[in-house]
Amino acid sequence: MRIETTRHLHCTVLRAGGVLDHAGRERFSDRINQVWNWSAGPVLVFDLADLDFFDSSVIGVLAMAMQRMEEQGEGRIILVRPSDHLLSVLRLTDLLSRVELRGSVEETVAELMLQSEVSP
């Protein structure tokens, strides 16, 4: 499994590729914990489009981040270019309503920058 992280002013982008299974889940969860405070909130932007395979571990990773955000009372999870299969899994597990969906990382980063400029 490949995990790339990019720190932006208003978000952290996590790109994952390869296979996300039980072993990958531990690595991905650890990486999320390492970058947790890179952005206020935090705002985590997940680009999982390059995953060749994922099992229920993807739900575990996202649910862990969601639970931590709920405990803190803040944060956002944004999924970029999710596959139809991932969308159906999120819908079945009732997690789809707890994430935001976007078309590209670049547009998401730009949108977050504009939102911060407009917000008091």
Image (cartoon, rainbow, N blue to C red):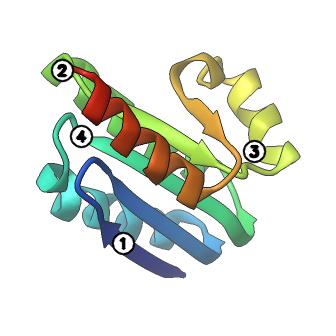
Residue assigned mark 3: 86
Q: Three-letter amino acid code at disc 2?
A: Glu
10 Å neighbourhood of mark 4: few (<14), some, or many (≥20)?
many
In front: 102, or 17?
Answer: 102
Q: Quadrant of the C terminus?
A: top left
Q: Is residue 22 left or right of residue 74?
A: right
Q: Let me know if residue 12 appears in the view.
A: yes
Q: How much space separates mark 3 and mark 4, taking CA atoms?
A: 22 Å
Q: Is residue 111 left or right of residue 119?
A: right
Tell me, yes or no, whether the two marked residues, 3 and 2, touch with CB atoms within 8 Å: no
Tell me, yes or no, whether the two marked residues, 1 and 3, touch with CB atoms within 8 Å: no
10 Å neighbourhood of mark 2: few (<14), some, or many (≥20)?
few
Please name which of the two marks, 1 or 2, marks the residue nearer to the observer: 1
Dot placed on the residue nearer the N-terminal end, 3 or 2: 2
Q: How much space separates mark 4 and mark 1, taking CA atoms?
A: 14 Å
Residue assigned mark 2: 71
Q: Three-letter amino acid code at disc 3?
A: Leu
Question: Which quadrant of the figure has residue 1?
Answer: bottom right
Q: Three-letter amino acid code at disc 4?
A: Pro
Q: Residue at left 51%, top 69%?
A: 15
Residue assigned mark 1: 5
Q: Residue at left 12%, top 51%?
A: 37
Q: How much space separates mark 3 and mark 2, taking CA atoms?
A: 25 Å
Q: How much space separates mark 1 and mark 3, taking CA atoms?
A: 21 Å
Label 2, secondary structure: give it: helix
Dot placed on the residue nearer the N-terminal end, 1 or 3: 1
Dot placed on the residue nearer the N-terminal end, 1 or 2: 1
Please name which of the two marks, 1 or 3, marks the residue nearer to the observer: 1
